[in-house]
Image (cartoon, grey):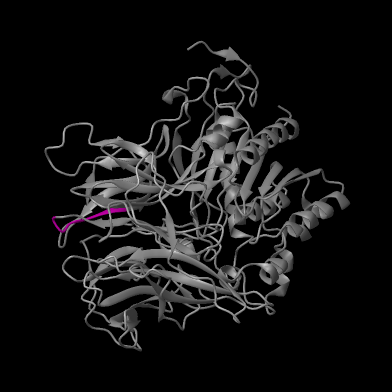
Amino acid sequence: MVLTTSGYGRWPSALAAGEVARFKISLSDLCSDGAALYWLEARPEENGRVVFVRADGAGRHDHSPVGVSIRSRVHEYGGGAVCLLPGHAAGAFAYVDQADQRVWCCDGGTDATEAPTPRALSAPAPPPARVAYRHGGLTATADGDWVLAVREAHPDDGPGPPVRSVVAFSTRTADPSESTVLAGHDFFGAPRVDAGVGRLAVVAWDHPDMPWDASSLVVVPLTRVGGALAAAGPPRLVAGGPAESVGQPAWQRDRRLRFVSDRRGWWQPYVHPADTGRADAPDATAEPVALSDEAAEYHGPDWVLGQSTMAEMPDGAVVARQTSMGRDALVRLRPGGAPQVMAQPCVSIAGLCAHGDRVALIGGTPDAPSNVWLVETHAAAAPPAARPLRPAPRFAVTVAPDTFARGEPFTLTGRSGRPVHGTLYRPTGRAVAPSDGPPPLVTWCHSGPTSASQPGLDLTLQFFATRGFAVACVDYAGSSGYGRAYRDELWGRWGVADAEDCLDAARHLGERGDVDAGRMAVRGGSAGGMTALNALAAGEGFAACTASYGVTDLERLVATTHDFEAHYTDRLIGPLPEARRLFVERSPVNRAASMTGAVLLLQGTDDAVVPPAQAERMRDALVATGTRCDLRFFEGEGHGFRRADTLTACLEAELSFYLAELRL
């Protein structure tokens, strides 16, 4: 490859903004019926439409009704918007229509040329009720007679939080028929029913807790009454409590209940007989799935419903995603044995399922975007042991895999004495800088804040790295994947510890000579936008900041945000009104006078999590202090951009912003 000489930030790159946007396809809800694999694809080219895809021996094709977008809005973030229907025609499935949030089903028999005909399983709220329903976390019973879901009933005629329950819809009646199976908690995770349709397992939690802070796993006996599915007795508490996070219940073939718990400091899998338990206290009879004292996690924060990082294989072994020090692996777990790492190429794994005696997973490699992979598990498997099921992106200009920047993990001791984890991506591409000086840096602050950076190939990150920027992704205090103690490091210190860690990481790389300490920018979205703005306000090195749909006013966030996060800040900062002073001090809108670098704000007009008014007030505060601020609104976009034209415009604006503000 012939290299040209060009200034940092202006290297010729094969990754055009429009192509990066077009291929920023999000994959989720992977499942199998033994004959075919299915998953959801969110497609920027179709204005963010989410499509159910089927892959079998005949190829891969769209499997959902034409024009329908499948997406749940339960907890605003959704999840579990589709499930297969066993006991029906091949390929039958139930789904949540994004437009009306009702549950529908298609009875199968679809192929690449035949559009399925949907029918409603759920009905609109009956009059005189003035509520609007949302559904998510779908699951079907083993006989396919019912689909269960988490329901949110939102009041239409005034303020008030939504009321949630677990409901069951009959798939065998011509008209919608439903029953309420469980209620009485503020929140529910995705329900799971055993093979005999005799027991329901579900995670529940209540305000002010988030599910990764404190949650409970309950088992409800089921019965059939007049054609309806109903509870046959009170819920029994089998795990969880005020200092324990549980999740991902699943019924095994031996009738035991598998789940994850952080009771020993890390989210790890356990099994419970589920025939015991009390109404008032958890049972202590759960056992670890495998012998492991590793500093590793098998679960992540439940931002969406229906997380799936484990699967039971035909031989009874459990295959799982294992996260350690910011990287994912695929491991086999057996009782009494240590985890065995399985060969596969992915460094980030979003979900998996069993597919016969093989494992299917959604994962990203260092040089390929997220894909659906099929992994051989038997010893006789000939190399390669894993193969992707979706075609690689076809860019207008050939992009060689070896031109992508590769992540280099680093850990430092921050000013607080705690560890700070991150990954550095050095500039890479078809050019060299005209001097031997270090490159400019863009520091990435992940969202959440209870989340983590993903090590798989990110085309947005590569858009900047292939143009001559170094990029540092920081897993600051509070990030997941490093155990409960690290998550809890952010309690009471959100707006301080996260910003300090991002600053310390950037300064560390500057002191090592990896980046130019005089040309550093910081960026983030949502909670990461607040982290980025507060890091800029510290005045310790950043010259520019990009905040996408970022939190700027913490008091207003609490007053206007949705119910799922209504008390999120109680632990991250403190309860109101007692902690009001801290809310004021840590809100970027009140720190505008300290921001000496320029700011680019990117905001959707339909954002229900961080309303547009927050971005407007941030801009006005910056302009009042004489600080340059560019605010750009995107019509029809919510919390997280989904449309190709929006993603393209944002990338082009951000690149131009850095070129100007970092003097490149």
Image coords of residue 485 (percent x, y) = 44, 65
Which residue is farthest top?
2
Which residue is farthest left?
380
Q: Foreground: 86 or 588?
A: 86
Image coords of residue 636 (percent x, y) = 67, 50
Is residue 32 positioned above or below 292 on the image? above
The residue at 19%/71% (across/down) is: 255
Is residue 429 positioned above or below 103 on the image? above
Image coords of residue 452 (percent x, y) = 48, 52
**Left or right of residue 514, residue 603 in this image:** right
State the image quarter where residue 173 is shown: bottom left
Q: Quadrant of the C terminus?
A: top right
Image coords of residue 134 (percent x, y) = 53, 67
Residue 104 visible (yes or no) = yes
The residue at 70%/50% (across/down) is: 603
Q: Foreground: 156 or 638?
A: 156
Q: Foreground: 67 or 431?
A: 67
Q: Residue 317 magenta-drawn?
A: yes
Is residue 222 positioned above or below 55 on the image? below
Residue 339 visible (yes or no) = no
**Left or right of residue 517, residue 384 in this image:** left
The residue at 60%/31% (across/down) is: 18
The residue at 52%/20% (across/down) is: 397
User: Exactly how many numbered labels are in the figure?
Assistant: 0
Q: Residue 384 magenta-drawn?
A: no
Is residue 377 positioned above or below 160 on the image? above
**Left or right of residue 340, residue 400 in this image:** right
**Residue bounds of the magenta highlight:** 315-321
